[in-house]
Image: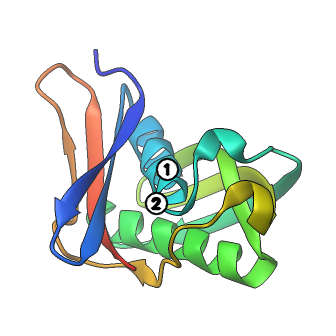
Amino acid sequence: MTAEHWEHFHHQADIGVRGFGPTKEAAFAQTALALTGVITDPEEVKPQEMVPVVCEAPDDELLLADWLNALVYEMAHRKMLFHRFEVKMTGHRLQATMWGETVDVARHQPAVEIKGATYTELRVRPTEDGGWVAQCVVDV
C-alpha cells in the first residue's frame, strides 16, 4: 500500500508538487504539505492555529487545483504557513482542516511566493499498489 509522503518534481521555471497516500484524501493532504515545502521546511511550521477550508469541483483534478489554490489564498490572506492537514472528501466536495502558524521570516526563511496551482500536469489517480497520487505544477 502506498505510504504517505510528498515530493517536488522539476518543471521548467515552476515547481511540481506531488502527494502520495493510501487514500485519495491522504494524497491530497500530502500534496498540500508539498506546497508548504516549496516555501519552507514543513517541520519548522508549528500547528498553532486551525483553519477550515471547503472546496467543490466537478472532478478530482479540478478539486485538487481548487484545494491548493484555497491553501495559497489562506497563506497569503492570513500570512500563515501550514503543517498539518486533515482532508475529508465526499464525491467531489472536500472539507479540510489545516493547522499552522503566522509566518516568522527569521525562522521559516520563505524561499518563494506561490502564485497558484495550475492545470499543468494536473493528475489524481490510483497507484499500482492500491494507493493514490495527486499532483500539479504551481506557479512561483
The residue at 76%/55% (across/down) is 107
User: Label 1 belongs to which residue?
Assistant: 90
Left or right, residue 89 beside residue 126: right
Left or right, residue 14 beside residue 117: left
Tell me which amino acid carries mark 2: Val
Query: Which secondary structure lies at badge 1?
Result: strand
Residue 59 lies in quadrant:
bottom left
The residue at 38%/40% (across/down) is 6
Query: Which secondary structure lies at badge 2?
Result: helix
Visible residue check, residue 69: yes
| Rendered view: 81 above or below 21 | below
Visible residue check, residue 103: no
Residue 23 lies in quadrant:
top left
Please state, as top left, top right, bottom left or bottom right, where the N terminus lies in the image. Answer: top left
| Image location of residue 34, percent across then percent down | 45, 50
Left or right, residue 134 beside residue 108: left
Residue at the top extreme, as displayed = 1
Residue 86 lies in quadrant:
top right
| Rendered view: 132 above or below 115 | above
Q: Looking at the image, is mark 2 or mark 1 nearer the viewer?
A: 2
User: Label 2 belongs to which residue?
Assistant: 38
| Image location of residue 122, percent across then percent down | 22, 65
Residue 106, labelled with which disc? none
**Which is nearer the N-term, disc 2 or disc 1?**
2
| Rendered view: 27 above or below 77 | above
Residue at the front extreme, as displayed = 106
The residue at 70%/57% (across/down) is 108
- Nearest to the observer: residue 134 or residue 75: 75
- Determine contact: label 2, label 1, CB under 8 Å: no
Tell me which amino acid carries mark 1: Thr
